[in-house]
Amino acid sequence: MKKFIKNLPKAELHLHIEGSFEPELMFKIAKRNSIKIPFNSVKEIENAYKFNCLQDFLDIYYQGAQVLITEQDFYDLTFSYLQKCNEQNVRHTEIMFDPQTHTERGISFATVINGISKAQKDAKEQFGITSLLIMSYLRHLSEEDAFKTLEQSLPFKDLITCVGLDSSEKGNPPSKFKNVFKKSEEVGYIPVAHAGEEGNADYVWEALDLLNIKRIDHGNNALQDKKLIAEIIKRDLALTVCPLSNTALQVVTDLKEHPLKEMMNLGLKVTINSDDPAFFGGQVNQNYIEIQKALDLTKEDLYELAKNSFQYSFLDKETKEKYLTELEMYFEKNK
Ligand code: HPA
Ligand code: ZN
């Protein structure tokens, strides 16, 4: 089964580039920029990665991102993640980045996006991996701040496909960002949002009705509401589920109790993703491996999950078809 997963062509649709920052690279870049971090070794960092909730994690995640200063730093971060994609047969990835985490510290929007997009271009040339960008607004900041970010993004519009919403969910409902999402959609960005990770089903309703999202990040708590489940199916929206993130942040107590299979049985379109792989104990393949084992998923289940990952990506029709054909051939040969 591990081999089947390893070679399975797949897409990753929920990945924060700042969350892919491995301790080794963090040390290297911190040293290069003469920045002190409050850890002395990779081991110390790994020991600090024990979280009781989303906020616990976010505090340490934003701290780590502070060592990123130059375009080269953003390039190295992104290219390192894309190399891992190549090793895992991730054929396509939709990368979230948090501009405000960096612009707040005086790093320019151009530095961030130029570094990231150069790495995307090189990975396409070297590995054939396609990728696109989701610019995510930090929901603990104001809508006014998000508007500023939208403004800063306009000269780089061609490099960005979607807008997203991440960071501390509770107390920061989607309604807070209604106007900036409306404007973002008007300029051509596709809206997605984290919803129902720690927030309840009402937050998912708001993301659907007020932000007009085209995909739901996490969405676990949508299961609290039957009408909502029916609405998600009616709108044909996929959920980007992140199993190891859910256990790391205590959204789910044990993988054996993870609702992924229940979601699939209800007719929801689910995908498997790593979220913040450097912090949650595994890349996307490790997420497939561990959830397969915990829920005793079949090869057909895994095929369906990988199929959804391409089907519900924001790729053009032709590229989607190409990947789906590749996947189908793989499944027919290895089932
Ligand atoms: N949830 C909310 N915000 C985030 C996450 C997450 O899982 N990862 C990085 N920012
Ligand atoms: Zn996330």
Image (spheres, rainbow, N blue to C red):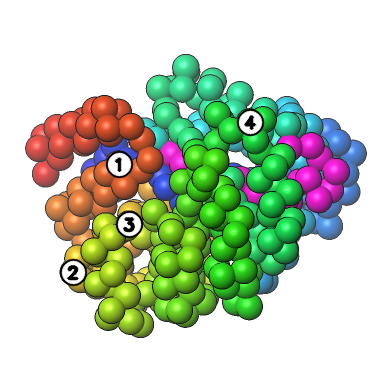
Q: Is mark 3 on a helix, strand or loop?
A: strand
The reply, left or right, for residue 32 in relation to residue 302 is: right
Label 4 to label 2: alpha-carbon separation: 41 Å
The residue depicted at 57 percent of the width and 50 percent of the height is: 183
Label 1 to label 2: alpha-carbon separation: 20 Å
What residue is shown with label 2? 265
Which tag is nearer the camera, tag 1 or tag 4? 4
Residue kind at label 1, given as amino acid type:
Phe
Please tell me which of labels 4 and 2 falls first in the chain.
4
Please determine whether, in this image, residue 144 is positioned above or below residue 175. above
Q: Can residue 36 be seen in this view?
A: yes
Q: Label 4 near label 1: C-beta < 8 Å?
A: no
Q: Label 1 near label 3: C-beta < 8 Å?
A: no
What residue is shown with label 1? 310
Residue kind at label 2, given as amino acid type:
Asn
Which tag is nearer the camera, tag 3 or tag 4? 4
> Which range of residues does the magenta coloring cover?
93-109
What residue is shown with label 4? 156
Front in this rendered view, residue 190 or 79: 190
Q: What element carries label 4?
A: helix
Please tell me which of labels 3 and 1 falls first in the chain.
3
The residue depicted at 15 percent of the width and 37 percent of the height is: 328
Q: Label 3 near label 2: C-beta < 8 Å?
A: no
Residue kind at label 4, given as amino acid type:
Phe
Residue kind at label 3, given as amino acid type:
Ala
